[in-house]
Amino acid sequence: MSRIRRSGVAAVAVAAALAMSATACGAKDTSAGAAPSVTASPSIAAPTAHLPHLTLPSGLPTSLKDLRKWQDGDWKNWKDWGQLAHAAAAFANPIIKDLWKPARMSQARPETPDQVPASVGRDKGVTDPEPAPVTAQAVATPYHQYQAAVGKVFFDSPQGPMVCSGTVVQDPAHPGKSDLVWTAGHCVHRGAKGGWYRNIAFVPSYNDHALPSSQVSTAPESQVAPYGVWWADWAQTSNQWISTGEETGGTGSPYDYAILHVKPEKGTGKSLQETVGAAMPVWFDAPSASALPSLTAFGYPAAPPFDGQRMYDCPARPGRLSLDTSAPTEYRIGCTMTGGSSGGGWFAKKPDGTVALVSNTSIGPQANTWLAGPYLGPVAQGVFDAMEKKIG
């Protein structure tokens, strides 16, 4: 099981590799091994109130001079994962104007995800038989008409530019004016052996008309990023992911989710939701897989046979996957999406007929026949509440 959650490197696609690694980003998407041994009680990143008492970790800009160096390229001067700021409250992501241009986005591709045995999880907790593969289908274009809330998450790691997928979600504290994006934890933070990625940005309705890969790098920005580039000025993920998340084996995957608060690189005075015209509600404590008749996973798969330039979906009936009896049982569906789809939203219909986000792509097997995503229970609600508190 590789963790599709990690952001893929290169191609604008924020697609993450799903080989039971974190499916989210492009780095290694393989965190689907033994789940972390943690309790299900809410555990979130340090609250904003603590920030004034902290100092930025080494390597991040602490003055105007440092910020200028950062913007001029100093952010590239890292050599290993140890240079990532690890602590929950150490997130810093200054805007670097024009960094994420079509040419650079088109180069971001998911790294080959680590994998785990296909049988992982079968002997732990409640796990249903492995689902049959569901062939991913290309979403109709233009995306802004069909799935405007879905897009790509881009970021930099020591391995280069990476990509994942993400979804604009509603912000109850700011009705109709949300600036929140839901993605996978491994698309923003490497987990136990690393820290926060850099230059994290979201591009809704990426490559709106599904231009072929050969044309994306030279296409007008208005076609590749029809709603512009939105930079994360804060990110929130679970303490479980930060302390136990791994690139292989699925460890931490039951808590592999994150929320970004974003702002436009080129200010318009409008929120992300107003700009895009769509945002998905988050359905916390949704029915378990055994009681949910169907759901659809969305994302931008970037590992072969996909190239990260098109949005795909997989409608399927979910099953259960348990990697740790002390952690929530995850949703699992048959789906052939690959790395780069990490972090992509899973949507289901509520009893009132509305559609809401119930999970995100986190892990998958080497054969790319299925995907698994975390159950959004009390811990996920706590992470979301922490973001609400942070943004006021």
Image (spheres, rainbow, N blue to C red):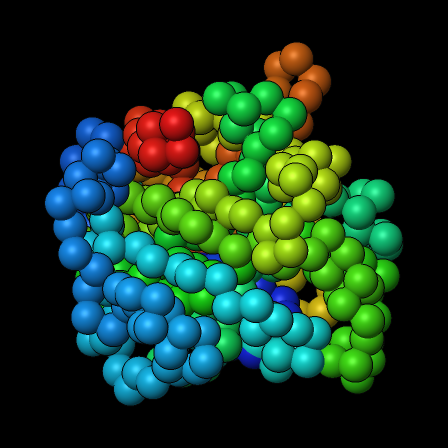
- The quadrant in which the N terminus is found is bottom left
At x 81%, y 75%, the residue is: 219
* Of residues 207 and 324, the one drawn nearer to the viewer in this rendering: 207
Residue 67 position within the rendered picture, expressed as x and y whole percent measured from the top left: 37, 69
* Of residues 377 and 79, the one drawn nearer to the viewer in this rendering: 79
Any part of residue 351 in sight: yes
Q: Is residue 113 left or right of residue 134?
A: left
Any part of residue 131 in sight: no
Q: Is residue 83 left or right of residue 164?
A: left
At x 26%, y 64%, the residue is: 62
Please identify the quarter of the rendering in which residue 254 is found.
Answer: top left
- The quadrant in which the C terminus is found is top left
At x 17%, y 39%, the residue is: 50
Q: Residue furthest front?
A: 64
Residue 111, compared with residue 290, is above or below; it is below
Q: Is residue 339 left or right of residue 259?
A: right
Residue 74 position within the rendered picture, expressed as x and y whole percent measured from the top left: 37, 81
